[in-house]
């Protein structure tokens, strides 16, 4: 009639073999759920680790970009400073040339005046 007695002489609806298989399946399911939970924990910690590494890599990337931009900025500043110095050198060269021409002119004037003084002294 579909009623069975177990080893403790309790009345059961399921056959003992089916009940044993059900109990075994229940234990296997528990083990599977436990393993799945453990797997989820491991995967969760792995994801956290990967996120931390990604953040660290992003920080290093930003530092590298900042350093590169600073280097470019310094190079541009040096280039501008070099141009300013080149302009100053050109200006000083022009000033030197003007002073040289003025010196030569003054030397010529001095020679002329000395000659005039000498002639004036000899005429007296």
Image (cartoon, rainbow, N blue to C red):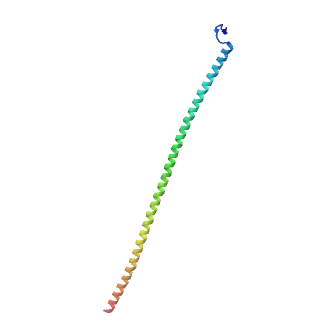
Q: Is residue 113 toward the left or the right of residue 72 in the image?
A: left
Q: Residue furthest left?
A: 124
Image location (x, y in percent) of residue 47: 56, 35
Q: Is residue 52 above or below residue 79?
A: above
Residue with the most extreme bottom position: 123
Residue 45 point in image, percent of width and height: 56, 33
Residue 95 locus on image (x, y percent):
40, 71
State left or right for residue 2 relative to residue 56. Answer: right
Residue 40 position (above or below residue 52): above
- Look at the image and tell me in which quarter the N terminus lies: top right
Of the pair 1 and 101, the residue shown nearer to us: 1
Residue drawn at (52%, 45%) of the image: 60
Q: Residue furthest right?
A: 17
Residue drawn at x 48%, y 52% as measured from the top left: 70
In percent of the image, x 36 and y 85: which residue is there? Answer: 112
Is 60 drawn above or below residue 75 in the view shown? Answer: above
- As rendered, which of 15 and 97 lies closer to the eye? 15
How many tags in the picture?
Answer: 0
Expressed as whole percent of the image width and height from the top left, the position of residue 87 reads: 43, 66
**Which quarter of the rendered picture does the C terminus lie within?**
bottom left
Rendered position, 16 above or below 28: above
Instruction: Locate residue 14: give its quadrant.
Output: top right
């Amino acid at each position: 009639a579909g009623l069975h007695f177990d080893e403790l002489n309790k009345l059961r609806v399921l056959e003992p073999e089916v009940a044993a298989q059900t109990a075994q399946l229940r234990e296997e399911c528990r083990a599977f759920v436990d393993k799945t939970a453990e797997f989820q924990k491991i995967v969760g910690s792995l994801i956290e680790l990967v996120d931390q590494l990604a953040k660290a890599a992003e920080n290093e990337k930003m530092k590298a970009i900042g350093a590169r931009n600073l280097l470019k900025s310094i190079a541009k500043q040096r280039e501008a400073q070099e141009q300013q110095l080149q302009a100053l050198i050109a200006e000083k060269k022009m000033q030197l040339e003007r002073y040289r021409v003025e010196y030569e002119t003054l030397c010529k004037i001095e020679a002329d005046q000395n000659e005039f003084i000498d002639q004036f002294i000899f005429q007296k």
